[in-house]
Amino acid sequence: MVRHSLLSVILVGVSFSLYAAKHTSALKTDSASLVVATAYGKLRGTTDQNVYVWKGIPFAKAPTGELRFRSPQLPEKWEGIKEATEFGASAPQMKSSFSRSEMQDENCLSLNIWSPAADGKKRPVMFWIHGGGFVVGSGSSELYNGAKLAETGDVVVVTINYRLGVLGFLYFDEKERSAGNFENNLGIRDQIAALNWVKQNIAAFGGNPEQVTIFGESAGGTSVETLLACPSARGLFKGAIAQSGPAAILWQPETAKSITEKFLATLNISSDSLHLLKLLPADSLVEAGNRLLKYMVKETPNKVFSPTIDGELLTTDIFHCLSPAQSGDVALLIGTNKDESTMFASRKLRMAPSNSKKLEKEFLHVLKPEEKERVTNVYKNYPRKRGVLDLLTDAVFRIPAIRMAECQSKHSPVYMYRFEWSSFFLNVAGLRSFHGLEIPFVFGTADGSRYQRMLKYIASKKIRTQLTAEIQTAWINFARFGNPNGNKGENWKAFDSNEYATMIFDRKSELKNDPDAIQRKAWEGVQYY
């Protein structure tokens, strides 16, 4: 199905520095000001730009040995002061642009905290979950440096690592689970463990444990949506921001089981010898996982790993309406980019069908004839490449986001956005407003890393400053007040199923009702998941 086939992965009127911390000139760098006491021991951090940062904090025991393929366990306590000045290892994963310069180790369950001050002030907490198709990525990527966001918003920013690929999302059936040696959805369980750690300890870093907003992009956005449906995550956050997170990608047990069987066959391990999975080196599992991914991409509609509806941690498909009892007290900000699919169709990834013939083979054949005709007729560039990618962007990203917003808005405040900014160079390259382009504007790092440095050449300083101000202000307002307007009027109306109010982020950002309504209406009633 197309929901699996593509993942490899506002206000200008409010001042950009509305909530900026006023401590910059008085930032203390003496040793005592950097030491914080947690429930597990004392940590010494360092400074990053104009805020404090504590890196590589363990929120669980190392998931190694008998703890491999098990739920995360509480971390060990320590004596003295632990240095928290270096990022922890990333989860074991295949080589990619997300991981090429980072140390990897199975002992990867750590988090990082940026805060204006560990002063007892109850600041909103913004808890970031990285993307990467549940197979690559890290919370320590320079793409997600939380310093500027923390300073600008006077908020506490947390980024985390969680288990990926076969170590984080391999599925085991009821018999295997009942033996007590294996559990499912470990990457999501890691995220919940990190949230519990934050609940217990973040006050010591100047954060409010009762005012946590989770946010993430791509697989991180899907994680946000999944956590909304997890009973064990209830009460750990008050707000949720889902950026380009397909809400329809969860695996059913039969699909997940077939993937596990293929993985075991890759290693020549029988279902009666699963204990061998705990004895093999992590590198061997990752390499076998890479071979499995190549098979999945080539031979199946499942291109990356995904959480599974296992009946224990996760009991419902997030693509269907969640009950108020599950997510009724959580405000949601949700949105997509206008051209999500262009990156997946690039020569480097080749994850998306770029012509109508391939689209028919991989997706359109699951639609009823009348549905296929109705949907394809509303994309003016179809069957050319741009029309194919526009259709895929809607099918995989925008329509699922709208359907989730329709459901959640019945009992909770919901705000929808779409990121549409592009540039001449991005248009010539065929990328336009591609998947993930909004991230450096969210973190305020558009002039930073190798990824952001590209923006210096394709976007003027005026555009970088404007979009960063608009998006950061909205995200910070949402974390502080539960809506992107803050306490300054209603420029950004809440979403409902009558007007479909959507904030468009572009050179001139503005609120629009039901943008691209013709395409949205063409998908009504079409069940392709």
Image (tube, grey):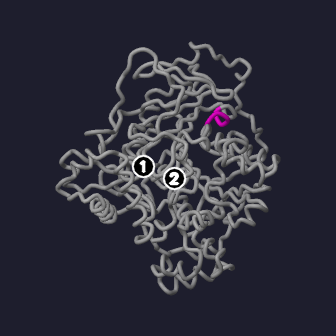
- The image shows residue 208, relative to residue 104, as above or below, that is above
- The image shows residue 481, relative to residue 467, as above or below, that is above
Q: Nearer the viewer, residue 96 or 491?
A: 96
**Pointers 1 and 2 in contact (CB under 8 A)?**
yes
Q: Residue at x 58, y 53 (%)?
A: 243
Q: Quadrant of the N terminus?
A: bottom left
Tell me where residue 152 appears, x and y as whole percent. Answer: 69, 34
Tell me where residue 203 appears, x and y as whole percent. Answer: 51, 25
Quarter of the image for residue 117 reads top right
Q: Is residue 134 left or right of residue 356?
A: left
- The image shows residue 119, relative to residue 234, as above or below, that is above
Q: Secondary structure at mark 2?
A: loop
Which portion, as a residue range, is magenta? 146-150
Amino acid bearing label 1? Leu
Amino acid bearing label 2? Gly
Residue 132: which disc?
2
Q: Nearer the viewer, residue 470 or 8?
A: 8
Task: Calculate the distance from the C-alpha at mark 1 to the C-alpha at mark 2.
Answer: 9 Å
Tell me where residue 463 appears, x and y as whole percent. Answer: 79, 50
Kindly identify which residue carries mark 1: 164
Q: Residues within 10 Å of mark 1 (few under 14, many from 20)?
A: many
Q: Is residue 50 left or right of residue 182?
A: right
Q: Secondary structure at mark 1?
A: loop
Task: Say if the magenta span includes residue 147.
Answer: yes
Q: Is residue 190 left or right of residue 413?
A: left
Q: Quadrant of the C terminus?
A: bottom left
Q: Residue at x 63, y 71 (%)?
A: 390
Magenta stretch, overall SS: helix
Q: Residue at x 33, y 49 (%)?
A: 313
Quarter of the image for residue 402 reads bottom right
